[in-house]
Structure formats: C-alpha cells, structure tokens
C-alpha cells in the first residue's frame, strides 16, 4: 500500500504539465497518489496519470483529512488518528512538512485550536516536531510510532466491532464473512477493489465453504 | 480521489506564524457582565455573563426565544442594555459603535443589504467606509470563489448568496472579531461549509475571535471550542465545549416493569428523557450519577443503569432544558 | 462618506426629478390660478414632504438602515448625509417653482420673494416628512404619518400665540413654520440617532413624540412668557382714557382703565390705585374694560372686551376669578348687584328683569315682570331693590330672592313726577339716595329719603341719547355735574339747585371728551375728562387750563387723559403724575 517514488512525480501536474505554485489548491489521486491542480482534476474529470483509473468523485472518497463531526470520538482525536494513518501510509514521510494549522482548520472546517491541539498531542507522542517559525514536520522516527499506533487503533476498533458482533450472537465464520463484505465495500468505495483482489484472502474461501454447509 | 491541502514544504508561505497555537489566553475581546434586556416589564435576557476570549470560537446556544439575537444586538450596541455592562475590544459599543464596527464584522440573521446596489457597488460603499482596511482584491477573489456576479443587484441574490456576500464584506474589512447571528440558518450545505471554512481560517490568525449563534449542533461540534448556553429562567452556562460535554452523561436505564406509552415519569429536575421504550429509557443528566440515581430508583422500577458519554446534541438538549433555578451542574461554569 | 452620499443621491433621484416634472405637469394641465395652486402645492408641500419621507423609511423597510448601522459610520453622519442628499434634490423643484409660480402681474423681481416666502412651508413639510420617516419603519405609514405630524405640530404651535396673544396667523405662521420645520428635523435627528432606527422599535416614535411635545411645550411656554411679559410690559405704554374712573365711595380706591394699540393688538387694562399710599396694582387680566367697584370697595368687577364674561377681582387678596357669562348672548356683563352674599347680575329684558347668580349653584336667579315703559336705573347699594322710572314716577322693585313673578308684584311707586315733568332720562346717585331726572326743559332731583324735590334752572343737553342721565355726583353728593345745552357741564348745588360754576368742553384731540365731570376726592375740584381745564367748585376759579384730567388722585395730583400713567416703578407702584398747576 505504500507507494514509493510518488513524491518525485508530484512536482508537476500530470494534466497541465505545470509546476505547483505556492498556495495553489492541489489534489492527490487516491489511487496512484499523483498530485494534480485541483482545477485540472476538475476539468479532466479523473486522474490524468496514464493507466490510472482514479475517479474524481470526491464525495465517496475518504482521505487523511476527513473527519466525522457527529462521531462520539472528539474531533481532535480524529485528526490525530488521520495524521497517524497518513504517516503510516507514507503520505507524509519523516521530515515532511505538515500543512499549517490554519489550512487544516480551513479545509476541515474545524476550529484551529482543535487542530493545533491534535498537533500538540502528536508532538508530545514524538510523531511530529515543530520548528518555530517554519512549521510542523514529521519526526524522523515517526514511521515506527505511527505504524505501531495505527495497528493498535485499528485493532481496538475491530475489537469493539467484533465484540458487538459476538454480543449479537454471530459466530466466528459469520464475523469473518461480514468482515470480508465490509472490506470489499470499503475498498470499492475508495476505488481500490483491484488492489484488494490481488491480495490473498483466505477468508473468502472459508466463507464459500461455510455457505455450502449452511445451505440445505 | 481525495483532498489534500497543499504541496508539502515548498508551498509554505513565508513568515507565517508558528503552527503550534498557544492556548487561548485570558484576554477577552468581548465581555458582558450582568447583561439584561427588558421589553416593557418582560425581561428577555437577565443577568447574563458572557466572555469571548481571544482566539476562540464561542457558540451562543439556546432554544428559540431565549434571547440569543437580543444578546448579540446588545453586545454590538444595536440595542441598549437595560442593565449590565458590555465591552467589545475594550470599547463601549453604545458610545463608540462606529469605531467598534470598524474592527468587528457582523453577519446578521436577517442578512440586510442595500437592495438597490449591485454586488460591486455595495462593496465599493463598504470599502469607502472602511477605507484602507478593506481588502478589495481579497474581496474580488472571494466574490469569484463564491460565484457572486459583480453586476447583479443585491435584491436578486438568493439567501445563500446574500449570506456569502455579507460574509465576504465582513471578512475583507479585516475585523478582529466576527459575530455571526444564525449565519447559516435555512442555507444549504455548501454555504454552511463556506462559513465554517471562513470561520476556521479567520480565527487562525492571531488575536481574533468569533461569536457564533446557531442552532446547528454539527457546526458547533466542528468549529466551536467554547459555548455559552442560554437557558430560560436561569443563569447561562459557559465553558469549553469539551468540559460542558463531559459534564453531561447519558444513562440507559433498564426497567423491571413496563412503562406506559406516555405520561409523566416523575423524574427529578435536570434529568431529560431522550428515548423512551416500554422496558428502558435513555436519559441525559448533568453531574455525577449519585446525584440522581436514588431519585431515579424512587421514580422507576430500575433494573440497571448504564452510563455512557453523551453526544453534543444530547448535551445541548440537557443543558438548554428550561429551569427556574441554576441547574445542579452549574459548577461546570467556567 | 462620499460613496454614501452618492448612493443617497442616486436613491432619491426619482423624487428629485419627479418633483419638477409634477410641477410642469400641474402648470401644463391646469389653467391659470388652478395651475398655480396645484404647482404651489406640489412644489412646496408634496415634494418636500415626499423627499423627507424618502430619507429613512424606504431604507428602514428594506433593511438598509440596519445595514448602514453596522458599518463603521456614526449614525449622526449617516443621517446628516441623508438630509443633505434630500435637500440637494429639493433644489430643482424649488428653483423651477420659483421660476414658474410667479403670477402674471409679478415681474422677475418677485421671483426670489415668492421663493423666500414659501421656504417656511417647504421646510415644515420637509421636516414633517423626515420625522414621519423616522417614526415609521415602512414607507406607507411614514407617508400617512407625515401630514399628521406636520399639521398637528403646526396647529399646536400656532394656536397659543394666535388665540392668546391674538397675533395675526399670517404674520406669525412663517416664523413658526421655519422654527417648527427646523425643530422637526432636529427631533428626527435625535430620534434616528438615539432611537436606533436600524431595528423595529417604538423608541424612535417615543423620542419623536417627546420631542414634538417638548417643541409644543416650548411654544406654549413662549406664549405664556410673552403673555405674562406683555401683561406687564405693555402697561407703561397704555394711555388713560377719557371715561370716568370709578372711585370707591369712601374715596380710598380709584380704578383707572388704560388702553392702547400694541403689537399684539388693542391692549386694555385696569389699574387699581390706592389714593392714600398712591400705590398701584395692574389687574393681571387683558382685554379688561368697564370696571365696576363694589360699594364696599373690596371687590371689582371687570368686564372683558372680548366676548362675554369678565373677572371678579378681590382687592384685598388680589385674587382674580373668572366670571363666565356664557348663558348671556355675548354682549358682556350687565349691571352688577353687589349683595352681602355675593354678586348677582341684573339683566333687563323687554318686559322683565332677571338676575343671574354668580356665586350660586344655578346660573338663573330670580326674575320679575316689569312694564314695557319701565326704565331701570340700578340697584340701591346693599339691597335687592331696583330703582327705575316710568312716565308716572319713580318706581322701586324689590327683586325676589328666588323664583319668578309674572305679575308685577313687589313693586312700589316711590313718588310721582311733579305735574308737567315728562322724564326723559334719569340717574341714581352712588349712594342710591338721590335720583336726578331731566325732561326737555330742566332737571329734577328727587330725594328718595323723603326730602322735597329740587328743580334746577338749566337747559339740558338734548343731544345726549339714552335714558340714563350723564350726571355725576360729587363724593359727598352735595353737588352734581350735569351736561348742559351747548356742550358745557354745569355744576349745581344739590340742596338748592343753584349753579356754582360751569365747565366748557375743549377737546385736545387726543381722546374723546367725556360727557360728564370727574371730582377730586374732597369734592372741591371738578373737571371734564380730557377737556383741558380744572375748576374749583367753591370759587369758580379755573385752577389749570392745560391739563387733560382723567381722574383726580387727590386735590394736587391728577391722572392725565391721553397719556400713560407715569409709574416710577411698577414694583413699588408709585403714581407720579404731574402735580396740579405745575407744568
């Protein structure tokens, strides 16, 4: 999932072949990770990288800067997790500069204090490092921490969901089945179904077997 | 396809302030003490203490008719306060309203404009009045972004366009405080997002603050860090959103017996029912459970009580419940 | 600020340009005077009023006032700009009107005068429009409010000076309109800035109402002050008339009517002079005439020269009580009957005499029938006995206290005329004891106490009309002055009927010469008012030939007719008239 070399390709817009100027709105293709001018992506309708079928329907897309304000989880925590995921995915690599609090706040339409609190929390955890006057950067050792934290977070989420499923009376097979379906849906929503298909998924086979048994 | 913000590192504008924002200091850009307003014999607002610290987005919450707009008008000196004192940016808004409005942007609930002017004509007037402060280029950019045609008359603008125009005019006069009275009521999601984005980037600058009166809890959850909750017949609660939210809990009360479909339950004051099933009710309440568990058990055949954190909406429901005396959790007041 | 001004100019353009068009249309569509009137109404009433209304109300209705209130603009400046723009747009209409609305007789020289004369009207209408515009938060109520405000304020402000001070309305109206127009604009200014017109509120209306009330109160106060001032200030300029000045029977008090033309019109006052101390008191009522002293000298009835009624003045307490006489036909107060229990008025109708009770609960008192040829002469002081005469003789009628009598009851014939005496006119002495009557050839004095009648060998002045004889008794009633044939006044001894001396009427031309004589308090000097001579009754010697005596303060001091009372100061009230004989 970590796509190497995408930073190098991102210095020029694949559609208009112009460089990126300061304060220009830039969008990244979720599929191939290439940077586009926001307008260029809008005009072209989809990712302009040859062979990439990334769609521009952004409503279905969740990136590292999407939050759910009605979620019981505080917005600050949501932002912190998103940053962690982004670092773990390699969107931001050690030494990269993060967007300013102001830009994040404006883009997410959240209070800058919330963003800055999330940054502060991550800085305290050693994921980010702030340099006065220049901005906030990803800590050199952030990748390991981020990966670790991501693992723990995702695990806890799954744990809660699994717990609920067990409470609801599902057995292990059924839970696996549900999980597979959920995974497939999420991937499709993100336009990454093909990637998913390439991965070995033993659960799918298990599900088929289970189905066969259950069907009289 | 997804949004990202800017090209990392290289696009950072020069001389930007440090991103690590210091917590909001105690400097208050708006302050009201013992504010009261009377129409005839009826007190619409009474004994309201309110503070908007620098760097904060403060929500003014309350049910309809609790006096939010009245409060805002008093804060801006547009309505004389019957009692109490108001200070905005260190000025008395009644005496020095003109000076105050040169440093304060206001988007009113009614969204009044000069109907006979065009968008650019209106901007010219506002720019002329504000003088050097007004950022004409910034306004043009914002106007283009908000798709407001410069030649269209104000009277032909839709509700959303009016709100956007007022917002752009307010922002481009480079105010220190932004006061928004129900800015997005009756508007679509896109305009609401514009407002939220504008608020977020506005307040990110040093020394600024926003007072926002709204009904939309989702907006409050997103953008506000402080809230003043006005209640009928009681002193307002104010404090940080998170602490207000933490002061309220949600309790699922499982019952041994079966409740009637409707009718009063005889619950103690401050306990608000949000869901009601024959075998279980969900209530929200302020303060620690020991304050009312006994009362609940006395009123209902309780089998078990489960406590969970309340959502902001439930917090709001609980805290705006009209009461005649200060609620049990007024210690949450900041 | 200039942007706002430009915006106001543009906004008010339809009104500013529509005005001249309306004036032109009025001139073109209507003929002659009609066109002039319509054009006048449009240019000086309609357009200023509409421009006034257009200043704030349309903005308030459309939310622009609220918008402007949120700009960093002082509301005072906002309002000033609005006013300025409206006044600028008023100019075309006014200029056009001043060019067109000169009637055919007036040349171009009159143009400016016409315009200047109408400026107050236009300003008042503009002020009313502006105030209506501030009071109402929408256009239509403002349009309806403006005439109400303007007319109400004008009537309210105009009424006190016109009614109280009797200033002619056309003279004061321009001044008042100018002041009122300015006041209305100022009130609108305060109501706009202090009343927060940017929101829907009754505050501007309350402030405006208070302001208008204050302006009207100012007008009332000014009028009252002017009234009070003119009551006092006018007095030194008023002159003494030639009519006889009533004096109390004990001779202590003298009442002098004075009058004169002032800027407020004819001023008539009554001055009470204490002869002993020479102190004066101006009775604080205007339009006072025909004063009548009570026999006891403690009260004074003053009649009003404007309409019916008058005042009853207590000389001891100096209290003034209004005596209304509305049941009468507006002629003024008839004869007064001073009774121990109060004052009644005696009214002679064709065949009956009525009394009107002043102090009683009912206006109508007793009435009694009299014959057609009864001539009443007055009331015997201290009684309810009315004395009069008819061709048969002297008649006394005792008025009943209450009720009415259709038959001539309570009537007693006092004495019959001597044979051959055909009474023409008669007069009663102040004490009510003597009655002097005349026929074509001579005078007859009847002593009602029972003494023998006395005949006077003198030819009466037949030219004096009426059934009252213009006779005047000396203070002791021992001498009588009677008008004689040829215009002179003869002074006769009451007891013997012999002539003592005579006075000749010499008109000085200033005031009308009186028919009868006035006496000094001791009865030794007599003079015909305004007739330039004073005679010593005892010696027949003329003491002064160059004095127009109106009344004697005493034997040495006179009050001169046709001249103001010479007061050293009103406060200590000293009469300083020229001593007798001096120059």
Image: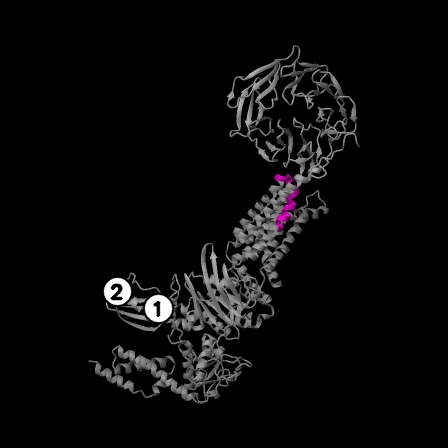
Relative image position of residue C149 (x, y in whole percent):
56, 48
Return the chain for callout 1.
Answer: B
Tell me if residue C32 can be seen.
no
Q: Residues within 10 Å of mark 1 (few under 14, many from 20)?
A: many
Check the image and report above or below for A116 versus C21. below
Near-viewer residue (B43 or C574): C574
Residue C159 as seen in the image, left or right of residue A121:
right
Q: Quadrant of the C terminus of chain C?
A: top right
Residue at left offset 37%, top offset 79%: A189
Q: Is tag 2's residue or tag 1's residue first in the polypeptide sequence?
A: 2
Magenta range is: C163-182
Relative image position of residue C180 (x, y in whole percent):
62, 48
For label 1, the residue is B285
For label 2, the residue is B259
Tell me if residue C314 can be seen.
yes
Check the image and report above or below for C480 versus C550. above
């Amino acid at each position: 999932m970590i796509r190497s070399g995408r930073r190098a390709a991102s210095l020029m817009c694949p559609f208009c072949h112009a460089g990126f100027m300061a304060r220009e709105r830039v969008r990244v293709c979720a599929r191939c990770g290439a940077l586009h001018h926001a307008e260029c992506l809008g005009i072209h309708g989809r990712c302009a990288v040859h062979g990439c079928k990334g769609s521009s329907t952004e409503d279905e897309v969740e990136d590292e800067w999407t939050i759910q304000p009605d979620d019981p989880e505080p917005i600050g925590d949501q932002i912190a997790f998103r940053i962690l995921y982004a670092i773990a995915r390699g969107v931001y690599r050690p030494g990269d500069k993060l967007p300013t609090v102001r830009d994040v706040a404006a883009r997410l339409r959240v209070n800058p204090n919330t963003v800055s609190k999330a940054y502060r929390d991550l800085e305290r955890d050693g994921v980010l490092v702030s340099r006065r006057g220049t901005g906030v950067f990803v800590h050199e050792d952030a990748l390991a921490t981020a990966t670790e934290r991501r693992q723990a977070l995702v695990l806890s989420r799954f744990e809660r969901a699994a717990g609920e499923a067990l409470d609801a009376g599902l057995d292990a097979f059924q839970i696996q089945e549900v999980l597979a379906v959920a995974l497939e849906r999420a991937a499709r929503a993100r336009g990454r179904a093909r990637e998913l298909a390439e991965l070995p998924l033993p659960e799918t086979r298990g599900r088929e077997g289970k189905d066969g048994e259950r069907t009289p | 396809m997804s949004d990202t913000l800017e090209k990392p590192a290289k696009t950072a504008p020069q001389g930007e302030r440090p991103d690590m924002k210091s917590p909001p200091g105690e400097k208050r850009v708006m302050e009201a003490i013992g504010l009261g307003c009377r129409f005839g014999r009826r007190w619409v607002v009474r004994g309201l203490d309110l503070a908007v610290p620098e760097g904060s987005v403060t929500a003014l919450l309350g049910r309809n008719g609790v006096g939010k707009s009245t409060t805002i008008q008093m804060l801006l000196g547009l309505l004389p306060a019957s009692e109490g004192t108001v200070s905005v940016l260190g000025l008395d808004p009644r005496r020095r309203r003109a000076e105050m409005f040169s440093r304060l942007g206001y988007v009113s609930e009614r969204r009044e404009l000069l109907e006979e002017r065009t968008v650019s004509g209106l901007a010219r007037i506002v720019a002329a009045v504000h003088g050097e402060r007004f950022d004409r280029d910034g306004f043009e950019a914002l106007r283009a972004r908000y798709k407001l045609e410069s030649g269209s008359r104000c009277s032909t603008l839709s509700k959303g366009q009016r709100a956007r125009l007022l917002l752009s005019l307010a922002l481009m006069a480079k105010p220190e405080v932004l006061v928004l009275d129900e800015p997005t009521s009756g508007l679509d999601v896109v305009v609401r997002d514009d407002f939220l984005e504008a608020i977020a980037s506005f307040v990110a600058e040093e020394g600024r603050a926003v007072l926002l009166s709204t009904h939309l809890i989702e907006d409050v959850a997103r953008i506000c860090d402080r809230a003043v909750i006005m209640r009928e017949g009681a002193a307002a609660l104010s404090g940080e959103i998170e602490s207000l939210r933490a002061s309220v809990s949600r309790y699922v009360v499982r019952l041994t017996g079966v409740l009637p479909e409707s009718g009063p339950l005889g619950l103690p004051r401050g306990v608000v029912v949000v869901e009601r099933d024959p075998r279980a009710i969900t209530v929200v309440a302020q303060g620690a459970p020991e304050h009312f568990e006994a009362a609940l058990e006395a009123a209902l055949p309780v089998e078990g009580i489960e406590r969970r954190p309340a959502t902001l909406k439930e917090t709001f429901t609980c805290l705006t419940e009209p009461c005649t005396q200060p609620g049990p959790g007024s210690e949450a007041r900041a | 600020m200039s942007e706002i001004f430009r915006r106001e100019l543009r906004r008010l353009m339809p009104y500013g340009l529509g005005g001249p068009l309306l004036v032109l249309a009025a001139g073109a569509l209507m003929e002659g005077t009609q066109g002039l009137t319509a054009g006048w109404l449009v240019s000086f009433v309609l357009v200023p009023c509409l421009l006034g209304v257009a200043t704030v109300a349309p903005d308030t209705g459309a939310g622009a006032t609220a918008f402007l209130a949120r700009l960093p603009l002082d509301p005072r400046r906002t309002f000033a700009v609005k006013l300025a723009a409206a006044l600028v747009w008023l100019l075309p209409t006014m200029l056009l009107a001043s060019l067109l609305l000169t009637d055919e007789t007036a040349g171009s020289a009159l143009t400016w005068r016409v315009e200047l004369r109408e400026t107050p009207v236009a300003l008042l209408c503009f002020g009313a429009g502006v105030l209506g515009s501030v009071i109402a938060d929408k256009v239509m109520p403002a349009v309806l409010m403006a005439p109400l405000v303007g007319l109400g304020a004008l009537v309210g402000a105009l009424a006190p000076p016109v009614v109280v001070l009797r200033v002619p309305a056309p003279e004061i109206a321009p001044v008042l309109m100018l002041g009122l127009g300015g006041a209305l604009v100022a009130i609108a200014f305060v109501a706009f800035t202090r009343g927060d017109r940017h929101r829907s509120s009754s505050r501007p209306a309350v402030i405006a109402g208070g302001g208008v009330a204050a302006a009207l109160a100012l007008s009332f106060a000014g009028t009252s002050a002017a009234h009070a001032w003119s009551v006092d200030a006018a007095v030194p300029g008023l002159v003494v008339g030639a009519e006889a000045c009533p004096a109390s029977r004990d001779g202590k008090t003298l009442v002098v009517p004075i009058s004169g033309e002032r800027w407020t019109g004819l001023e008539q006052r009554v001055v009470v002079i204490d002869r002993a101390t020479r102190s004066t008191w101006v009775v604080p009522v205007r339009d006072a005439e025909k004063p009548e002293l009570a026999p006891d000298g403690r009260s004074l009835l003053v009649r009003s020269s404007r309409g019916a009624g008058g005042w009853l003045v207590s000389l001891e307490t100096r209290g003034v009580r209004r005596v209304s006489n509305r049941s009468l036909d507006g002629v003024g107060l008839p004869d007064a009957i001073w009774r121990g229990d109060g004052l009644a008025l005696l009214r002679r109708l064709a065949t009956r005499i009525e009394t009107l009770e002043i102090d009683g609960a009912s206006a109508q008192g007793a009435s009694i029938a009299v014959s057609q040829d009864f001539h009443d002469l007055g009331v015997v002081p201290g009684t309810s006995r009315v004395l009069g005469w008819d061709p048969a003789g002297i008649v006394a009628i005792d008025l009943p206290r209450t009720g009415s009598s259709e038959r001539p009851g309570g009537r007693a014939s006092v004495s019959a005329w001597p044979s051959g005496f055909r009474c023409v006119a008669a007069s009663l002495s102040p004490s009510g004891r003597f009655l002097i009557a005349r026929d074509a050839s001579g005078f007859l004095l009847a002593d009602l106490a029972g003494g023998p009648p006395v005949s006077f060998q003198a030819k009466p002045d037949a030219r004096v009309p009426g059934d009252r004889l213009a006779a005047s008794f000396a203070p002791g009633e021992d001498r009588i002055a009677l008008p004689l044939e040829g215009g002179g006044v003869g002074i006769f001894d009451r007891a013997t009927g012999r002539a003592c001396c005579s006075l000749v009427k010499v008109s000085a031309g200033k005031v009308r010469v009186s028919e009868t004589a006035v006496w000094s308090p001791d009865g030794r000097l007599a003079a015909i008012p305004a007739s330039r001579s004073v005679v010593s009754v005892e010696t027949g010697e003329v003491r002064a030939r160059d004095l127009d005596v109106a009344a004697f303060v005493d034997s040495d001091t006179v009050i001169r007719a046709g001249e103001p009372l010479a007061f050293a100061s009103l406060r200590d009230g000293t009469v300083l008239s020229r001593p007798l004989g001096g120059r």
